[in-house]
Image: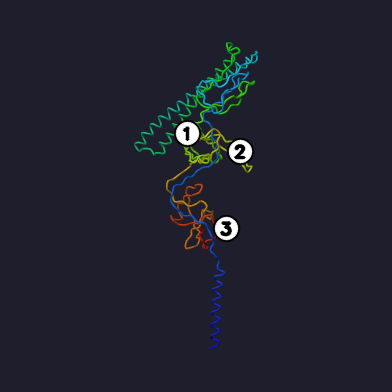
Amino acid sequence: MLLSKTLRLIGISVAIAAVILFFVMRPSPLPVDSGVVKRGPLQVTLDGEGVTRVNERFVLAAPVTGKLVRIALEEGDVVKKRSVVASVLPAELDARSYSEASSRVGSARAALDEAVARQRRVQLSLQQAERRLARYQNLYREGAVPKESYELAETEANIAQKEADQARSSVEAARFNFAALQATIDRQVGGKAVTVLSPVDGRVLKIHEKSERLVTAGSPLVDIGDPSAIELVIDVLSSDAIMVRQGSRVLITNWGGDKQLQGVVKTVVPAAFNKVSALGIEEKRVNIVAVLGANEPLLGDNFRVQASIVLREAKSVLQVPVSSLFRGKNGWHLFVIEDGKAVEKAVTLGMRGTWQAEVLGGVSEGRRVVVHPSNELKDGMAVQIQE
């Protein structure tokens, strides 16, 4: 009787010890961060740094070798078309200088003819773009083409108009340059000052030479441009540039203002260049030129911006955080939290943005997934969501 009671006490003690040991030795749940599978808009973008530049920039140079009269203008001043920007007192020409000046006049004449030919070519492109826009406008009203096609035709027409304006200004600049060089060999000029005229209405962006001094023909004197006609130059890897198309949307951030600016891709420059990265690696880069949709008066020439070129986008797709994905044996995997445990699942992905990725199968909407899964996390392990 006494032995039976003792055995029962020993058994109870062992059971209690086993229970205590189980709770003591049981691994605690692994703390994890989590996200939710949900529907929403998604953009696939190509991000890069860029700089602004004035679209129609004119560098006015000394037309002759001589003494520069001190320039009275200041940077930022407004100038009108055909107004005097600078004056140069030409030096006396000897036989050799006269021959060189005559050659420069011939070169300026050829440049003027080339500018006129380019203007005619651009004008034909503008007319074609306008006809295409009118045709797409009618088709869009009838529902025969999607809105994106109509907007692309409208963008191409706007870009063609800007190129036509630039070509017209280039003709004016070439004509002024030819007239100025012609004056150097015109014997009626004598010792009179040769004036440098502004080819367009604009503002003084930069003054290269302000004080009175001797300058040679071709020396840059003043940069003239219209700060409201700003374009962006974004350099990206050449392997990424092939995904960019003319007319693609561009989102501009980190430019100094509070709002996000909008633009469109104007040109993908067809030639790449070498650039050494911050890690010392030589890369092949390509410049993407974009134009702003609306003028931003706070932006100036050579300002730094952060740009995102929209490659693909959708208004509503099922998506998961990119930080929840990892490579498995047969593609992309993630951990779904079920009943306090992490369950590994294979998923099929579609578009992949910077922070979110489209999921086509493997997980349903509303499920909670582990983000930033650590190497310690295994399939079926108990987890605790951190607040």
Structural distance between the alpha carbons of marks 2 and 3: 37 Å
Residue 311 x, y percent position in the rendering: 48, 42
Q: Which mark is residue 295?
A: 1
- Residue for badge 3: 375
- Residue for badge 2: 275
Q: Does 342 appear above or below 128?
A: below
Query: Going by the image, does 317 lie left or right of 77?
Result: left
The residue furthest left is 142
Q: Say which amino acid is labelled 2.
A: Lys
Between discs 1 and 3, the one toward the N terminus: 1
Residue 346 x, y percent position in the rendering: 49, 56
Residue 300 x, y percent position in the rendering: 53, 33
Q: Does 307 appear above or below 20?
A: above
Between discs 2 and 3, the one toward the N terminus: 2
Structural distance between the alpha carbons of marks 2 and 1: 31 Å
Judging depth in this view, the residue of 190 and 56 nearest the camera is: 190
Between discs 2 and 1, the one toward the N terminus: 2
Label 1, residues with CA under 10 Å away: few <14, some 14-19, many ≥20: few
Q: Does 80 appear above or below 2?
A: above
Q: Does 342 appear above or below 314?
A: below
Judging depth in this view, the residue of 270 and 265 nearest the camera is: 265
* Quarter-of-image position of residue 209: top right
